Amino acid sequence: MASLLSPSFLSSLFPSNPRRPSQCRRHGYSSRLVVSMERSDTNASSNRSSTAVIWFKHDLRVDDHPGLIAASRSNAVVPLYVFDRRILSRFTDEMLELLLLAVNDLKKLLNDYGSDLLIRVGRVERVIQDIVKEVDATDVYAEAEVEYELCQMMDMVQDAIKSVSLLYGNPQVNIWNAPLHDNMNLKDLPSSYRDFKKLNFPIMSPQLPPTLSSVKMNLNWGSMPSMDDLRSFLGNNPPKSQVDWTSIKEISAETILSDSQFLSSNMNVNGRIANPKSGEIVQKSSYKPSKGKNFKSLFAGQGKDLIGGGTEIVLDALAAYLRYLEGTVRDDWQELHEKLRNAEIRQGASFRSLFGSAFSLGIISRRRAYYEAIKYEKERNAGFLSPFGYSTPTVAAVIETVCSMEWYWLMAIKGQSITKEPCHIRIWRWKGYLIQFTVVGHEGPAVLLVHGFGAFLEHYRDNINNIAENGMRVWALTLLGFGKSEKPNVIYTEIMWAELLRDFIVEVVREPVHLVGNSLGGYLISIVAGLWPVLAMSVVLINSAGNVVPGYSSVRFTRERKTSGVTRLGAQFISLYLRWTIKSIVTNCYPTVASRADDWLINEMIRSSNDPGVEVVLESIFSFNISIPLNYLLKGFNNRVLVIQGMKDPIADSKSVIAMLREHCEGITIKELDAGHCPHDECPETVNAIIKEWVFSIGGKTLTC
């Protein structure tokens, strides 16, 4: 099994005996001994003649690479990158271009260090198994993962390696990571970010690249594929149904609404124009280099809006970003400063927007970015750090973004190790952000549960398993910005959340679902059903947000969302107010069974309210647009819409809601309950029975894609 190279901060996740395998693989790969190799007080295989295979995935660098440092202690090192369809299919064409640039740069760097990068194409577990046999590897090193599908791949790699029997026994698998904080035990990790910051754990410094063995093995090292090669590999005669299914993501909600004449022609966020096809913000640069000058841009990809290349380019771009206020004569830095201004849709948002892809591919580590920001801050302040904040908004953006990313990574790692939660948590990465979800059941129709504003997937704590027990597969996820899912510095809109749900169905569920949503979740699933009807078998609205508008053809939708100092102050006030009054607010939503507004529910809401980025989410309250009426969105779902309405809802006039739905929505079924705003949690047995009967009445047959 994996050798013990781990720091104390992650020891709580794993068995006290490092050579005893984990007894449970439900959250991902077994024996997940996450290791950080800065301290080497071990008796690892470096003490004997050894060969190490280091599997690069989303860690495409030699700088600050603990796995490479540990592997360098072996007599021979075989760096490996595998172009695996399961990994590549997760990337857009733009990300594939950035991937190729980063892998190519990594290969050149390793050549400079006297090594090379072995390039292979295929299923990674088979490739690694073959390489281990070919080079008689004693160790395999790989970075820790939190995403469920990647954890499954790690399991497969471990199983494949276990089947390899060499003269000295089985190769050891070493899982590493590069944590930002030192001397931290996850068992003692506070659930509140506010409490976590009070502990003031020391920050770990990034590590320099190691000296690699000069022994270069006689191998067929392979050659780098081109972009056309990857497209051909990924598009090698896929089934037509799969092409049609995945192509659903290619057209944005705005495009569909525009075609339906619902969308205002002025699609913008804080004055920035949206791409008419994708709906993404177009960062049009007005910068033009000096006449007669040619310069090498720091950007790459189809839109030339993302930092692209290897670590050296990314660090140069980071230096330019941090020094934004200083000005520059360099054309490439001026171009970056222009894109920074375009990407700053709200304060600090530009950093993740420009550098997010570099973090996703591991071209730069979080602690390297933190270190560079702090170093620059000290340069500006004669070697000191002010207790009153950072001297430039760019330094603040880097520090706050990196610390936020680290927190949600820690939460994801810890969440997968906890067995006492109502649901077994998995992680899905959407546009680089960590999203929590769960699934229960192995057969039957697919059901997706979507929570309301301020809630999380565990709000369906007494629905998920019960519904699944009756021959259904039940998914639930925590939307971006809520619960323990990530809360990045972005503009939150109902369209963004609807597109997240669309992508979750396409990428994770992979078949049409029965959509169930409470409150805001009800409105979001209505958007999904209305804009991408092929994804929905039926729609179940539980005290849904949204309006019914007679003569809806005159309603116009605009994507324009603005933030300001006023909205930020408003969000801060709401945040403080909710922390003091959340108990009474939630209890009022449970008028029939007030005991269901229990300490667990309240404490989890309070915990979430202290997460980094929560005030950005609350700003969305001031810009919600629910002008697309429910009767428009659901007009094609005759006899496939169920409304479960708590008639004692303190937030809405349930009698008026029901009357409007009956009058203007054809073919809907309505169930009136003696409950408040959250009937699914206030009277779960009743709601579960209604949903199960409904799904089976609609029919459980689905077309798996």
Image (cartoon, rainbow, N blue to C red):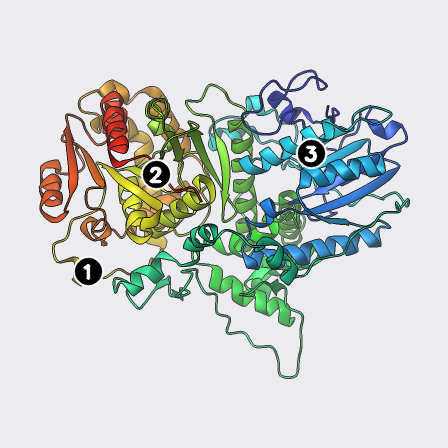
Q: Which residue is mark 1?
A: 555
Q: Which residue is mark 2?
A: 575
- The residue that label 3 is drawn on is 176
Tell me which numbered mark, 3 or 1, is placed earlier along the sequence.
3
**Residue type highlighted by circle 3:** Trp
Is residue 590 left or right of 391 when viewed as pictured?
left
- Is residue 393 shown left or right of residue 645? right
Residue nearest the observer in this picture, 398 or 593? 593
Q: Nearer the viewer, mark 2 or mark 1?
A: 1
Question: Hey, which quadrant is residue 330 in on the image?
Answer: bottom right
Which residue sits at x=27%, y=28%? 692
Residue 519 relative to residue 131: left or right: left
Which of pointers 2 and 3 indicates the residue nearer the eye? 3
Q: Which mark is residue 640?
A: none
Residue 584 visible in rendering: no
Nearest to N terminus: mark 2 or mark 3: 3
Mark-to-mark CA distance, 3 and 1: 54 Å
Inter-mark Cα distance, 2 to 1: 32 Å
As helix, strand or loop, the secondary structure at mark 1 comes to loop
Q: Quadrant of the C terminus?
A: top left
Q: Callout 2, which amino acid?
A: Ser
| Snapshot quadrant of residue 450 | top left
